[in-house]
Image (cartoon, coloured by chain):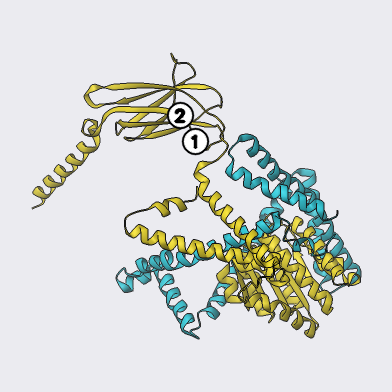
Amino acid sequence: MKRPLLFILAAVFLFLASQVLSPAVFAQEITGLRVFDTPGDGGESVTLEWEGGAPGAILIMRSASKGGPFEEVGTAFGIDGSYQDYVEAGIAYYYQISYQLGAEGYLTAQVGPAIAKSNWFRTYRVNALILAALMFGLVLYYINAAKRGKELYIRRIAGISAIDEAVGRATEMGKKIMYIPGIMSISDIQTIASLSILSHVARQTAIYGADIEVPNKDPLTFTAARETVKQAYMEAGRPDQFKEEMVTYITYDQFAYAAAVTGKMVRERPATNFLIGYFFAESLILAETGQSTGAIQIAGTAAPTQLPFFVTTCDYTLMGEELYAASAYLSREPNLLGSIKAQDVTKALIIITVSVGIVEYFFGSSVIKDFLVAR
Amino acid sequence: MRRTIPLALTFIVGLYPILAFFVPDVRIAHANDWLDEALVIVAAFALPLGTVNVIMTNTSKLKKKARGWQYSIVLLAGLAIMAIYGLIGGTGVDPKFQWMFVNMVSPLQSTMFALLSFYVASAAYRAFRARNVEATILLIAAIIVMMGRIPFGDMITGGRMTPLSEWIMSIPNAAAQRGIIIGAALGAASMSIRIILGIETTYLGSGKD
């Protein structure tokens, strides 16, 4: 019983091996070999393309003169293939490819010259340009509409509405407010969004006479946060109440920072904790400690991996786009509200495009799917 | 003038990476790299400011004998000792500095990180209480995902738990995450446009010139 089975298996294996190993079955002579400057790059490469060929290795050789000598630069595989060769810009290069074609032995083909040139636009990013232009146009349109006095509806965001309430609670309890602006530098857009909210919170604490503390992990964020709080106290007409100790630098080490801040939470028991910005693994350590001290907690981040921790441990969480909308929502300035409206309209357009793309894909076409691919 | 120059700089520096994203020319790419390097240099200048602040805050705490002043002694001593050995012997070669880093700093970091497991347990306990329909769905999904991650789950269900767990993670979970990511990306783009155009100035304080 076992012997026939082994015989069948061996036959199948030999058949499959012959399919793979015999180049004569698939291979055909290379035609249409061409070399050209890679479109949309900075002049650092040329691309070779061919039709036909062998399933085995195709040797790519290059020379700066037509007659050679050619030196090996790489190996390509497959029929109807291509190869991108990184070269010096402005020099004419010739290429020779060599491959095995069954019984006919090794064949070679030569092509060239091609010169790598710097291009002025990455053509493969035209989709990003269209989306950016659309959003830019919508922002300008809605800002103008808001300036003309058009009423723009922006949905209520519970987390933002609770900010003033949380400041008021701390004032009534006579306890401190702790504002943690994430652990990233000022170059991160979430940190800038956080500082915008900090500006509003600091103005409220100045008006109510509450105490605020802003511990920092990044030195650049620390200097920016100090200026933000100082400016907010000046605008509130209480520059005398601003104290340098309100905004402090802790350390550049992630977990040492988490240890220091949680220690402060446990010892000083602030009434309100704001955790707004970009966080990593320390998010849960901070939020869970704050939760255990009984503080009202408002968190905000666009980091999807940290959102579940904040949703679980905080009273309010600003998720993703809500974080960026907060400063506009709080200021109620038409200019800022216009950009939020434009953001919502762009999102609606993307939802429609993706939905149409899904339906189109079911019907066997992938035009929208291919267009939306980010490169 | 105090605000005009920063806003003009923000406009130029904010627009440049966008230009570099679309234009592949090497000269533009080099200038963009230079901007990134400039940020590192600025950050290097800001670090001593932070260190000075740490020293001042803790010295003031010691002078006032404020609550928890004993911790300030430990902090200042640690800062001084590490700085002295780092400056004299070098951070990568001095055996004393290395010994302190490997045997003191590193275990403390690991301890803080390890605490996460307990925080995850307490947060999960609160999150998975079946108070309403949504919380119950979350609880069921979490049980399936957790059981799918351990051999016991497959053992009691005849191998069904792992595929089910993978499906939850790669279909509904990934869809929700992508929704948040797309929304956040649009929010970031919208905020960037506001900052580049000088419409959003709250991070500078909302006062005018």
| Residue in front for this viewpoint, A217 or A297 | A297
| Residue in front for this viewpoint, B79 or A319 | A319
Q: Tell me whether marks 2 and 1 sit on the same chain.
A: yes
Disc 2 sits on a residue from what chain?
A: A
Q: Is residue A125 left or right of residue A241?
A: left
Q: Secondary structure at mark 2?
A: strand
* Relative image position of residue B189 (x, y in whole percent): 61, 57
Provide the residue designation for mark 1.
Answer: A39
Q: Is residue B134 above or below residue A18?
A: below
| Separation of residues labelled 2 and 1 (CA atoms) | 8 Å
Q: Is residue A364 left or right of residue A210?
A: left
- Where is residue A140, by image quadrant? bottom right
Crowdedness near tag 2: few (<14), some (14–19) or many (≥20) residues, C-alpha within 10 Å: some
Crowdedness near tag 1: few (<14), some (14–19) or many (≥20) residues, C-alpha within 10 Å: some
Among the chains pictured, the one given cyan colouring is B
Tally of numbered discs: 2
Q: Which mark is on residue A337? A: none
| Residue at 56% in and 72% down | B120
Q: Secondary structure at mark 1?
A: loop
* Relative image position of residue B5 (x, y in whole percent): 81, 51
Disc 2 to disc 1: CB gap under 8 Å: yes
Q: Is residue A218 above or below residue A310?
A: above
- Where is residue A69, by image quadrant? top left
Q: Colour of chain A?
A: yellow
Provide the residue designation for mark 2.
Answer: A36
